[in-house]
Amino acid sequence: MKRILLYTVCGLAMLTMFNSCHIYNKYHRPDVDVEGLFRDTVAAGDTLAADSLNIGNLPWEEVFTDTILQNLIRIGLEKNSDLQSAMLQVEAAQASFNAARLAFLPTLNLTPQGGVSSFDGSKASWTYNAPVTASWEIDIFGRVLNSKRNAKAVLMQSEAYEQAVRTQIIATIANGYYTLLMLDKQLAVTEETALLWEKSVETIKAMKIGGMTNEAAVAQSEANSYMIAASIPALRQQIREAENSLSTLLYQAPQSIERGTFEDQKLPEMLQVGVPVQLLSNRPDVRSAELSLAAAYYTTNIARSAFYPNLVISG
């Protein structure tokens, strides 16, 4: 009885020592004091329920309601090589996580062998051998446990990275699309302004003939008209370059991009800002960085457990 009690006390002491070395501890987010880091964006009378609603929780289909833009975004998501690479990284991390979970189970090895022998024309004799070995590592020092936690953190980091790539693709395509709409509107306004200045030049010339103005006013008016007319080819060149950039994002040959008009665009009428810290936690790149820290924490625990012996039961 005294020996059992001594073993129990020794075991509890060892577990306490290992726990103090953080071998069994889970990763915990460090406490960060955010007091005074952000301005109060909550208007008077708003409730906490309204604060929890922010634009970061809306699907991109509800933010970008233009059907043409939605089609372009879907094409970009389907053909983008960076997103495909990120998706393959998620699959690889999922396989590693499944392997880490199976490490808790016993390992069975079957190595069947066989042979045939014959001497001096005698009947051939067959021999068979099918040894089976089994082993099971008892995870006393947390190596298998931390390997599983590390694999899960890497999987979650890969998923966050995939979401970050997806978000970047959507934002870049939408930005290029709205840039084209802006340039189209700017070109239309510039062309209308050029026509108005041409009429203004004709009017000032008529006023000069009537003695109501001088040659300097005519020259000034013509200079303004020429300046506006000269900006039209530059705008058309910008539109062409923007279409080429957007075609590259869509993995297409440079071509004209189908698009709507600036006036037809509709965005959600109510865009809640929410709590700044909540918006920050929604960012996939921030989550990916934090999960990278968690994976490094569990990798450190694996290295610490390597200083202790492995207990494997085999048979």
Image: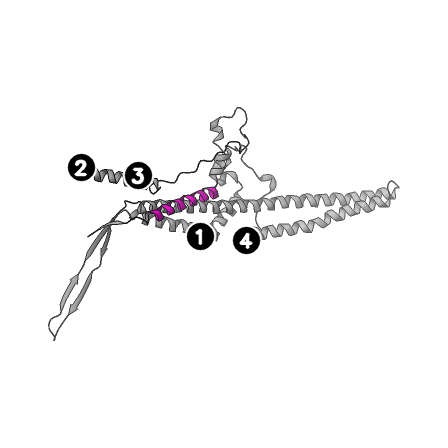
The residue to which callout 2 is attached is 2
Q: What residue lies at 34% left-to-right and 45% top-to-bottom?
A: 146
- Label 4's element? helix
Residue 284 drawn in magenta:
yes
How busy is the neighbourhood of tag 1: few (under 14 within 10 Å), some, or many (20 plus)? few
Relative to the observer, which residue lies in front, 311 or 294?
A: 311
Relative to 35, say whether 254 is above or below. below
Q: Nearer the viewer, mark 2 or mark 3?
A: 2
Q: What residue lies at 77% left-to-right and 44% top-to-bottom?
A: 199
Q: Position of residue 188 (x, y in %)?
A: 67, 44
Q: Nearer the viewer, mark 4 or mark 2?
A: 2
How many marks do you count on the picture?
4
Question: Mark 4: which amino acid?
Answer: Thr
The residue to which callout 3 is attached is 16
Q: What residue lies at 47% left-to-right and 42% top-to-bottom?
A: 286
Alpha-carbon span between mark 1 and mark 3: 43 Å
Does residue 224 appear in the picture of this structure? Answer: yes
In the rendered image, the quadrant that contains the N terminus is top left
Of the image marks 4 and 2, the number of the one nearer the N terminus: 2
User: Which residue range is magenta in the image?
Assistant: 283-304
Relative to the observer, which residue lies in front, 285 or 142?
A: 142
Residue 92 drawn in magenta:
no
Of the image marks 4 and 1, the number of the one nearer the N terminus: 1
The residue to which callout 4 is attached is 248
Of the image marks 1 and 3, the number of the one nearer the N terminus: 3
Question: Mark 2: which amino acid?
Answer: Lys
Of the image marks 2 and 3, the number of the one nearer the N terminus: 2
Tag 4–tag 2 contact (CB < 8 Å): no
Q: Position of residue 117 (x, y in %)?
A: 15, 70
The residue to which callout 1 is attached is 85
How busy is the neighbourhood of tag 4: few (under 14 within 10 Å), some, or many (20 plus)? some
**Is residue 40 rendered to the left or right of residue 148?**
right
